[in-house]
């Protein structure tokens, strides 16, 4: 017998096709979509508006399997982090950030990351594999279940693919998960509340626009190629001019749409007034806003956070140039849940963590 199909990974069209393939009407797919994603029901026996024989048939050929929570932590500021255990015993991390006007879930897209950005803890873990659509959307299911069980905590209103991994190197699994986030029969989020963050995979940006145009954030971090080559090595393949051209294409034809640029503030590296000016000129003709992210440390990190004064001056220069700029407040630092601190437990196929420990004498 074939292995059961995990229906958690299927977006509306795939679910309709699945029901057609077992000789059922496609609208059954829409009913099941609601049970899974709106009511969190994983047991077919509880899907009471399906006929009994269909429920029994589903038990034979399908399943709804979510990843498991291995552990969870709550920071002093209310940020929550879950270590999520996958079927192959890798673990990834998911973070919930409650704010006055929103609740943002930060979701991972890969086990580890292959891009090797110098200032990011995930890079040290090496890379193992892409997450499946079920493992991506499953992070929303887990977080919702956990938040529902915690009285007085606000619900998820926004999702950012800013956890572990590079989402645009996993589009075949990311896109069905995004379409479930947007589908009114599933999570029903407006595209304005769903953001994909990339280190700058140019072809992926064009493909995302075509397949599922949500919000785009780009991890820029440097105003010139020489520095960006060092901080974000994928820049050697897709340099800044190509990256910004792709950003302009991404927002073209969509009124009021902007790209968010993330810029991690590294003391004495990328935080001078001259670099702020250079950044302002670069972004002059890109509909943009800038998030300045004070660097978050991790054991053995080769950088320090910029001073508050350097961050304020940098921001002021961008604002003077007419660029909407906010400084992101670090959240969940005490539980290593802040940007760049997510490590999970990656079975490291790239051996990068071992290489790094040897080179740096660090771990
Ligand atoms: N690979 C994607 C998704 C990860 S998003 C991307 O690069 O955009 C994670 C964000 O946190 C990125 O903007 C990343 O550059 C930033 N970041 C990584 N390490 C950090 C650190 N130590 N301190 C602050 N921000 C960091």
Image: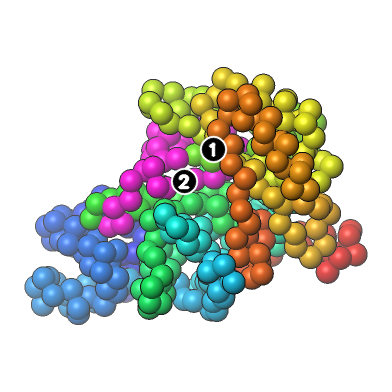
What kind of element bears circle 1? strand
Q: Is residue 303 above or below residue 52?
A: above
Q: What's drawn in magenta, residue-wise?
A: 186-215
Q: Could one spot residue 190 in this view of the protein? A: yes
Q: Circle 2 is placed at which residue position?
A: 195
Q: Rounded to the nearest whole Å, what is the CA distance between mark 2 and mark 1?
A: 9 Å
Q: Nearer the viewer, residue 169 or 100?
A: 100
Q: Nearer the viewer, residue 68 or 354?
A: 68
Q: Circle 1 is placed at which residue position?
A: 260
Tell me residue 338's x, y (percent).
63, 60
Residue 244 quadrant: top right
What kind of element bears circle 2? strand
Q: Residue at x 60, y 60 (%)?
A: 331
Q: Is residue 80 above or below residue 24?
A: below
Q: Residue at x 22, y 62 (%)?
A: 34
Label whose residue precedes the other's in the sequence (2 or 1): 2
Q: Is residue 276 above or below residue 118?
A: above
Tell me residue 218's x, y (percent).
58, 39
Quarter of the figure that contains the N terminus? bottom left
Residue 291 lies in the magenta stretch: no
Q: Residue at x 60, y 21 (%)?
A: 284
Callout 2–callout 1 Cβ contact below 8 Å: yes
């Amino acid at each position: 017998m074939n292995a059961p199909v995990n229906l958690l990974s299927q977006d509306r069209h795939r679910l309709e096709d699945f029901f057609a393939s077992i000789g059922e009407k496609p609208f059954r797919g829409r009913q099941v979509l609601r049970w899974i994603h709106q009511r969190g029901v994983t047991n077919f026996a509880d899907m009471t508006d399906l006929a009994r024989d269909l429920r029994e048939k589903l038990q034979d050929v399908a399943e709804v399997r979510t990843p498991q929570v291995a552990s969870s932590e709550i920071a002093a500021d209310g940020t929550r982090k879950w270590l999520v255990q996958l079927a192959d015993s890798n673990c990834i991390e998911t973070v919930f950030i409650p704010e006055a006007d929103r609740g943002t879930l930060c979701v991972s897209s890969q086990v580890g990351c292959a891009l090797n950005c110098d200032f990011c803890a995930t890079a040290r873990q090496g890379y193992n594999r892409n997450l499946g659509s079920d493992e991506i959307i499953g992070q929303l299911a887990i977080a919702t279940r956990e938040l529902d069980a915690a009285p007085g905590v606000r619900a998820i209103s926004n999702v950012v693919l800013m956890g572990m991994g590079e989402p645009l190197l996993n589009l075949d699994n990311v896109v069905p998960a995004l379409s479930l986030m947007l589908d009114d029969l599933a999570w029903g989020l407006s595209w304005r509340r769903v953001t994909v963050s990339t280190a700058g995979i140019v072809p992926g940006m064009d493909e995302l626009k075509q397949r599922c145009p949500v919000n785009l954030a780009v991890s820029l971090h440097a105003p010139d190629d020489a520095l960006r080559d060092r901080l974000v090595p994928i820049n050697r393949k897709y340099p800044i001019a190509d990256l910004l051209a792709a950003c302009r294409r991404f927002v073209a034809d969509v009124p009021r749409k902007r790209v968010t640029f993330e810029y991690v503030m590294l003391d004495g590296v990328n935080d001078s007034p001259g670099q702020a000016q250079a950044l302002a000129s670069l972004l002059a003709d890109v509909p943009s806003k800038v998030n300045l992210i004070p660097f978050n440390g991790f054991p053995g990190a080769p950088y320090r956070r910029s001073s508050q004064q350097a961050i304020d001056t940098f921001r002021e220069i961008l604002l003077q140039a007419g660029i909407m700029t906010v400084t992101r407040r670090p959240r969940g630092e005490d539980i290593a849940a802040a940007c760049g601190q997510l490590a999970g437990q990656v079975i490291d196929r790239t051996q990068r963590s071992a290489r790094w420990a040897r080179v740096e004498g660090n771990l």
